[in-house]
């Protein structure tokens, strides 16, 4: 049951954040059971000004979908015992080396045990010396050019995250290289 709720949360957060940036009218499905989410936004590199707004948005999302958000920049929250209190951990624009070896082990054990993980924006600009973290986020941030307009092609209209998108569309954004 925990894994199912964790997947629902990860999908709800990803879809809602994506929808917020792409089409503000899309709503996420409400969760069946209340649960807690840890939002971690510690930075040891570039600090995004959007972090407070991101925390506010996640708290609002929680209020609308029956989950509680605990926001912290305190890496000592990453202990096996503390992490059992949460259905998911969100790395919100974290940068640099933000966890020590013991904290990394706690997060790895949590995720390996079925705990949810969501990386938002600069989360891939984090923990470059920890190979398991690269596996978790899929790739590390390399660079990005100046903000610019791009033409995008929607390849899968069946997925709820892309169902509302046109076949081709344009967006001005900060396009990342991984």
Image (tube, rainbow, N blue to C red):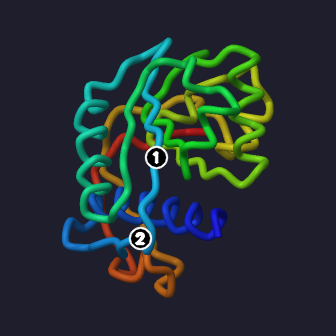
Among numbered discs 1 and 2, the one appearing first in the sequence: 2
Residue at left 64%, top 43%? 137
Helix, strand or loop at mark 2:
loop
Q: Nearer the viewer, residue 37 or 125?
A: 37
Tag 1 residue: 37
Front-most of residues 33 and 165: 33
- Image height check: is 94 above or below 4? above
Which residue is the site of mark 2? 31
Provide the secondary structure element on which disc 1 rests.
Answer: strand
In the image, 125: left or right of 19?
Answer: right
The residue positioned 35% from the left and 73% from the top of the image is 30
Residue lying at 53% horizontally and 78% vertically, measured from the top left: 155
Quadrant of image for the N terminus:
bottom right
Callout 1: 10 Å neighbours few (<14), some, many (20+)?
many
Residue at mark 1 to residue at mark 2: CA–CA distance: 13 Å
Give the image location of residue 110, x and y in percent.
Answer: 71, 42
User: Considering the image in quadrants, where does the C terminus appear?
Assistant: top right
Residue 166: percent from left, percent from top: 33, 80
Q: What percent of the width, then of the height, locates residue 125?
A: 55, 28
């Amino acid at each position: 049951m925990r894994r199912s709720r964790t997947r629902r949360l990860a999908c709800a957060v990803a879809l809602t954040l994506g929808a917020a940036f792409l089409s503000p009218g899309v709503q996420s499905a409400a969760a069946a059971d209340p649960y807690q989410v840890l939002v971690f936004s510690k930075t040891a590199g570039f600090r995004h000004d959007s972090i407070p707004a991101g925390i506010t948005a996640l708290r609002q999302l929680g209020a609308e979908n029956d989950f509680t958000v605990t926001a912290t920049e305190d890496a000592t929250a990453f202990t096996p015992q503390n992490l059992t209190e949460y259905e998911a951990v969100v790395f919100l624009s974290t940068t640099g080396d933000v966890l020590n070896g013991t904290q990394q082990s706690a997060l790895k054990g949590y995720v390996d045990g079925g705990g949810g993980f969501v990386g938002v924006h600069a989360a891939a600009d984090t923990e470059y010396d920890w190979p398991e973290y690269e596996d978790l986020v899929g790739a590390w941030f390399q660079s990005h050019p100046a903000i610019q307009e791009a033409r995008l092609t929607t390849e899968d209209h069946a997925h709820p995250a892309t169902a509302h998108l046109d076949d081709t569309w344009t967006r001005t954004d900060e396009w990342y290289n991984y």
